[in-house]
Image: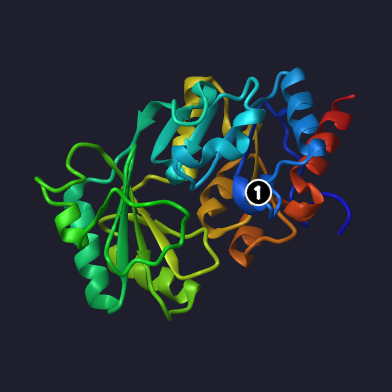
């Protein structure tokens, strides 16, 4: 594949694009976590043409330094799979939370209890607006030092170390289960208490509040701007992008995408390392004439 294509039988969007919503890891970012010069130029050209750009990611706000040099006009990002809308203009460490859609502690505790029973060996971490806590056996999946290391039940207790801030999501890791099998099991087990998805190649799940997803928060942001879903072009590569790819008027799965993302998208582009997002933006702008 050398260019962007639409899925067979899918008509082109009837309305011109007004907003681009793009995932970061595996999508906008190359595997080395860089943003190519071609992609930077394409984003700038889109904004020059009056198209808003939203970064929509599973990353927490404190991990947004990878795009801090490329904010320009697109200062808002949807982080934590829809749990927060963040203004990036302050730069790393100075992000302002515009909107928070928290995971209620009672829901988080219920999910922890149910997953422990359904998948013995599962270990947890707690992601908050400004904090990160984990259980003792949670692996060092990220290059950061947790603020507290305790069992999840203690972290989520009313008087626990995580009591002072909203919980954005729970991370659940299993050392041996197949990632997709773990996702299916968790959705069946805790779907009443949390929205469950994944973006990692390992068996690492991300649990947000019920109904909280990239798509639902993007829909709220678009409604505030008078933008319909038909006017949105979305890009993604993993299961946590599926709802967004389904919701947007035009959507593209990357050449390196998970099968669920490919099935959800209306089109397909080349891989992240081949600047697949830029390929589509360049084509969209060329079609405008």
Which of the 4 image quadrants contains residue 159?
top left
Identify which residue is drawn at 70% across, 29% down. 17
For the question of whether residue 6 can be seen, the reply is no
- Image quarter (top left, top right, bottom left or bottom right) of the C terminus: top right
Give the side of residue 43 with respect to residue 226, left or right: right
Image-based side of 253 in relation to 196, left or right: right
Q: Position of residue 216 (x, y in %)?
A: 44, 40
> In terms of depth relative to the viewer, which is nearer, 1 or 17?
1
Q: Give the answer, above or below, for where 91 lies relative to 5.
A: above
Residue plotted at (72% across, 22% down): 47
Up-down: is 100 above or below 108? above
Q: Secondary structure at mark 1?
A: loop
Screen quadrant of the N terminus? bottom right
Q: Would you say 176 lies left or right of 54 here?
A: left
**Relative depth, front residue between 181 and 271:** 271
The one of 256 and 135 positioned closer to us in this rendering: 135
What residue is disc 1 on? 33
């Amino acid at each position: 594949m050398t260019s962007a294509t639409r899925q067979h039988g899918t008509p082109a969007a009837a309305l011109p694009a007004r907003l681009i919503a793009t995932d970061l890891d595996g999508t906008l970012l190359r595997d080395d976590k860089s943003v190519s010069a071609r992609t930077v130029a394409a984003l700038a050209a889109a904004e020059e043409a009056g198209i808003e750009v939203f970064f929509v990611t599973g990353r927490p706000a404190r991990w947004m330094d990878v795009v801090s040099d490329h904010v320009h006009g697109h200062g808002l990002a949807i982080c934590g799979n829809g749990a927060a809308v963040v203004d990036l203009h302050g730069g790393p460490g100075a992000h302002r939370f515009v909107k928070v859609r928290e995971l209620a502690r009672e829901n988080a505790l219920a999910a922890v209890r149910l997953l422990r029973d359904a998948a013995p060996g599962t270990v947890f971490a707690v992601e908050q607006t400004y904090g990160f806590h984990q259980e003792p056996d949670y692996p060092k999946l990220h290059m950061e030092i947790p603020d507290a290391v305790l069992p999840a039940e203690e972290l989520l207790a009313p008087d626990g170390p995580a009591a002072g801030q909203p919980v954005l999501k729970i991370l659940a890791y299993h050392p041996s289960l197949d990632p997709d099998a773990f996702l299916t099991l968790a959705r069946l087990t805790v779907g009443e208490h949390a929205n469950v998805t994944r973006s990692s190649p390992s068996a690492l799940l991300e649990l947000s509040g019920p109904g909280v997803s990239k798509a639902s928060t993007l829909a709220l942001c678009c409604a505030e701007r008078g933008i319909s879903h038909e006017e949105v072009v979305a890009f993604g590569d993993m299961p946590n992008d599926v709802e967004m790819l389904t919701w947007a008027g035009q959507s593209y799965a990357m050449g390196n995408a998970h099968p669920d993302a490919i099935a959800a998208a209306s089109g397909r582009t080349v891989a992240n390392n081949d600047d697949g997002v830029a390929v589509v933006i360049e084509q969209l702008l060329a079609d405008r004439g």
